[in-house]
Image (cartoon, grey):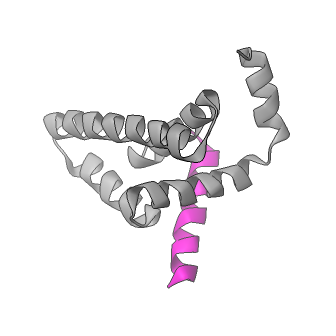
Amino acid sequence: MRSKTDFAIELEAQNIQKGFLTNLELYEEYRQRNVAQTINTQRESFVKGSFEDRRLLEEKVENEIRGFCIWLEETKDFDRDFARYYSLSIKSLLLGISIGEHIAQLFDLILKRQKLDK
């Protein structure tokens, strides 16, 4: 089993932005739905929802992310650490969690990509 240090070194060696775009494409394949549309729906539901609605949405997202992680491991032969990394990044987007400028830039990139696809 690799140490966390080895995993961190591998992540740094990769082009993270390119990897994230690949992640979005994989999620679209898994979900069979456009990721920009999914993100907008999830974010809107989270912002407008009551405390209980948000809790239920978080549970739903947790279950979906577990499924996505398993799908990456079983269908795409992802290493467990990478499957978890990819899944957690999608979880952040689905819940609309703002974790700094990097995520805001990714939202912009996703939405711009959506406009170009039309």
Q: Residue at x 55, y 32 (%)?
A: 84
Q: Position of residue 100 (x, y in %)?
A: 59, 41
- Left or right? Give the position of 15 relative to 106: right
Q: Residue at x 58, y 81 (%)?
A: 116
Extreme right residue here? 13
- Left or right? Give the position of 62 relative to 101: left
Q: Quadrant of the N terminus?
A: top right
Q: Is residue 71 above or below residue 17?
A: above
Q: Position of residue 101 (x, y in %)?
A: 62, 46
**Residue 89 in view of the camera:** no
Q: So how many labels did they put on this image?
A: 0
Q: Residue at x 32, y 36 (%)?
A: 63
Q: Residue at x 19, y 46 (%)?
A: 49
Residue situated in front as seen by the camera: 11 or 52: 11
Q: Position of residue 40 (x, y in %)?
A: 37, 61
Q: Which residues are magenta?
A: 99-118
Q: Indicate yes or no whether the magenta region holds residue 107.
A: yes
- Left or right? Give the position of 60 relative to 82: left
The majority secondary structure of the magenta stretch comes to helix
**Residue 28 in view of the camera:** yes
Q: Is residue 11 above or below residue 35?
A: above
- Left or right? Give the position of 18 relative to 66: right
